[in-house]
Image (cartoon, grey):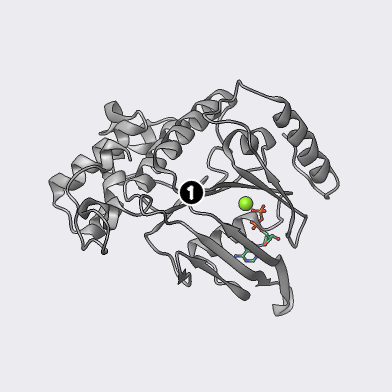
Amino acid sequence: MGNMLVGKGFGTAPAGMAPDAAGIDGAAAGGTGKVEISNVSIAFKGPGNKLVPALAPTDLILRPGEFAAFIGPSGCGKSTLMNAVAGFVVPTTGGIVVDGVEIRKPTPDIGVVFQNFALFPWFTAIANVEFPLKRFGLTRAQRRERAFAALEEVGLARHAEKYPGQLSGGMKQRVAIARTLVSNPALMLMDEPFGALDAQTKVTMHELLLRLWERRRQTVMFVTHDVNEALVLADVVYVMSAAPGRIIERIEVDSPRPRSAEHIDEGFVRRRAAIMKLLRNEPHAEED
Ligand SMILES: Nc1ncnc2c1ncn2[C@@H]1O[C@H](COP(=O)(O)OP(=O)(O)O)[C@@H](O)[C@H]1O
Ligand SMILES: [Mg+2]
């Protein structure tokens, strides 16, 4: 566990857990982050109140600590699926259970980093990161300390007092990641978080994200339309069909870790070709 999360525990420790493994300090450490998606389909009201399917019935189980990438044509329901797991959208059929609890509304145990999940522009970087800690009943000094440690982890300690408007796109997403990690969620949802970043910044963000994840091993659901990104990051890549989306392929990525964008092995090339082929057969596939 990262040193930002080592400290005094608070809340009540479940039996058999060290005191500092409770509450905020324990989410990812307790071997949690199991996601069970059962028969989940989602339809939205279209013109004339007709229901338009966005996600076909989907069944999926993510093991605790698994890094899963989701890739598929634009409009196939990737964000809809993320929004349902986050509790922002209620499934039309089926249910989503995270660590034994059915998701019906947003919960702080699930962290969200979306491309356009904006920071509060009127808060400094550190105040943005502190914000989600308010629910934990920490003192102001404790919140500051944790938020600062989280910013340090994403390499932004020097910019703690800057406002989002003074930060680059990559730095803003670092703040967003710090804001999510600071409460140590067992599950992280990332919906094209680096989609707007330039190629070099993206590579840096991949390395940062992998470093953080290797330390914490929270479960990650990561949406991308970038095949390389999926293969560098994930343990498993789910390929989705065009709308209404369904999972058409599950590809295990067993390339050794730690990984880097520079190290491309034979398996990488083979899987890349397989995914590209699947996407090419789908209308409106994005392939960059
Ligand atoms: N809140 C909403 N209301 C109505 N339709 C929606 C809503 N959200 C998404 N959709 C529709 O659902 C489909 C899937 O969208 P989305 O999940 O955003 O796709 P993706 O993220 O894969 O590009 C699209 O046709 C989109 O227009
Ligand atoms: Mg989307």
- What residue sits right under mark 1 in the picture? 65
Q: Is residue 285 left or right of residue 80?
A: right
Q: Is residue 167 left or right of residue 127?
A: right
- Where is the N terminus found, in terms of image quarters? top left
Q: Give the image location of residue 59, x and y in percent.
A: 66, 65
Let me know if residue 286 appears in the view: yes
- Where is the C terminus found, in terms of image quarters? top right
Name the residue located 60 percent from the left edge and 33 percent from the top edge: 232
Image quarter of residue 159: top left
Label 1 is placed on what type of residue? Gly
Let me know if residue 117 appears in the view: no
Q: Give the image location of residue 7, x and y in percent.
A: 19, 44
Name the residue located 48 percent from the left edge and 72 percent from the top edge: 104
From what the image shows, is residue 92 above or below residue 212? below
Label 1 environment density (alpha carbons within 10 Å; few <14, some 14–19, many ≥20): many
Circle 1 SS class: loop
Q: Give the image location of residue 77, x and y in percent.
A: 67, 58
Who is closer to the viewer here, 261 or 143? 261
Which residue of the protein is positioned furthest toward the bottom in this rendering? 49
Name the residue located 67 percent from the left edge and 70 percent from the top edge: 41
